[in-house]
């Protein structure tokens, strides 16, 4: 709950920043801003249902997946199976990853592998709920290739980060 | 969120100044600075594509948007440790450059 409020406020701050940028842009170049605004409005009109679907999906996923289940699976698994679970978990999760960092830290303290945690953070970059939106804008080929690379990287980075954390003495 | 689209052209025009390897680096750095849901990044990507930016630049921009963020780095340092944060982010930076070049070849 606390995390939810926190994330809400951080998002609210962004709106203010963007609003300020918008006002500055209006002062600097009225015409361009107007074109941008129209474009944005049009995009929203076209993608309204996609966005509503995204919101429903987000709520569904965050309600269905319980923290205790997550803890049980990544905390006690090890080896490639744990890594895969981490990768899939990161892929499915929605919202900004940093909100969950304290939770990931807790997992690490309870014996989860560094490997799994790094993989999860890497795979978090795959925004499953935004994929339909992304594909309508940038095309399926580009977005799918990009996300396959992120998934592969997430797994590789898990091993690399673990290696560096365990072998570099400071 | 509506307002986030407004800066699309300024970011796009800034990134359009760079090409080749320099484009990848600047795309990556801009992506790091960008905040908020990546959904507002896709229209910027489209704008870049329409104006002749390379696939590599757009890949670097979108990848670093989702993989590295200023907010997440600060929290990563505090919560997950210095060694973890440094190694993960350095590895990610290198990966983004490699994949961006690969994307340019593939697509």
Image: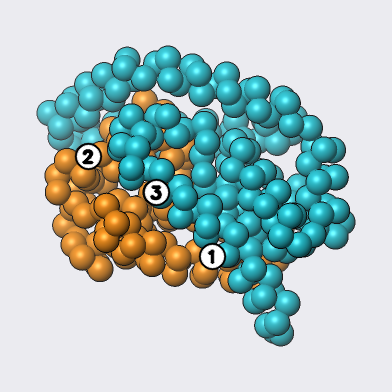
Chain colours: A cyan, B orange
Mark 1 touches mark 2? (CB < 8 Å): no
Mark 3 vs mark 1, foreground winner is 3
* Mark 1 residue element: helix
Residue at position x 54%, y 65% in the image: B89
- The residue singled out by tag 2 in the image is B47
Residue at position x 61%, y 38% in the image: A92
Q: Is residue B19 above or below residue A63?
A: below
Q: Earlier in the sequence, mark 1 or mark 2?
A: 2
Q: Quadrant of residue A157?
A: bottom right
Q: With A70 as the anchor, is A30 left or right in this view?
A: left
- The residue singled out by tag 3 in the image is A145
Separation of marks 3 and 1 at Cα, in angstroms: 22 Å
Q: Is residue B45 visible?
A: yes
Q: Which x, y percent locates residue A25?
A: 23, 35
- The residue singled out by tag 1 in the image is B89
From this viewpoint, which residue is outermost toward the bottom? A169
Relative depth, front residue between A168 and B71 = A168
Mark 3 touches mark 1? (CB < 8 Å): no
């Amino acid at each position: 709950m606390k995390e939810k409020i926190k994330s809400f406020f951080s998002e609210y701050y962004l709106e203010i920043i963007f609003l300020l940028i918008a006002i500055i842009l209006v002062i600097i170049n009225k015409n361009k801003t107007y074109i941008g605004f129209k474009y944005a409005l049009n995009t929203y009109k076209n993608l309204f249902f996609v966005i509503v679907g995204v919101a429903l999906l987000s709520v569904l996923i965050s309600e269905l997946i319980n923290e205790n289940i997550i803890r049980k699976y990544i905390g006690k698994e090890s080896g490639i199976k744990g890594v895969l679970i981490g990768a899939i978990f990161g892929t499915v999760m929605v919202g900004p990853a940093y909100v969950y960092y304290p939770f990931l830290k807790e997992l690490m303290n309870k014996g989860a592998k560094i490997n799994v945690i790094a993989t999860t953070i890497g795979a978090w970059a795959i925004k499953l709920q935004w994929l339909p939106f992304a594909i309508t804008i940038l095309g399926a080929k580009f977005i799918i290739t990009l996300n396959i690379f992120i998934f592969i990287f997430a797994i590789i980075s898990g091993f690399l980060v673990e290696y560096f954390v365990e072998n570099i003495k400071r | 969120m509506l307002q986030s689209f407004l800066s699309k052209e300024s970011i796009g025009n800034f990134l359009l100044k760079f090409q080749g390897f320099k484009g990848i680096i600047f795309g990556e750095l801009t992506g790091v600075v960008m905040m908020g849901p990546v959904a507002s990044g896709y229209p910027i990507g489209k704008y870049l594509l329409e104006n002749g930016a390379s696939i590599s630049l757009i890949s670097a921009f979108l990848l670093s948007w989702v993989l590295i963020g200023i907010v997440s780095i600060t929290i990563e340092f505090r919560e997950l440790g210095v060694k973890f944060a440094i190694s993960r982010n350095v590895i990610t930076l290198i990966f983004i450059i490699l994949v961006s070049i690969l994307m340019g070849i593939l697509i």
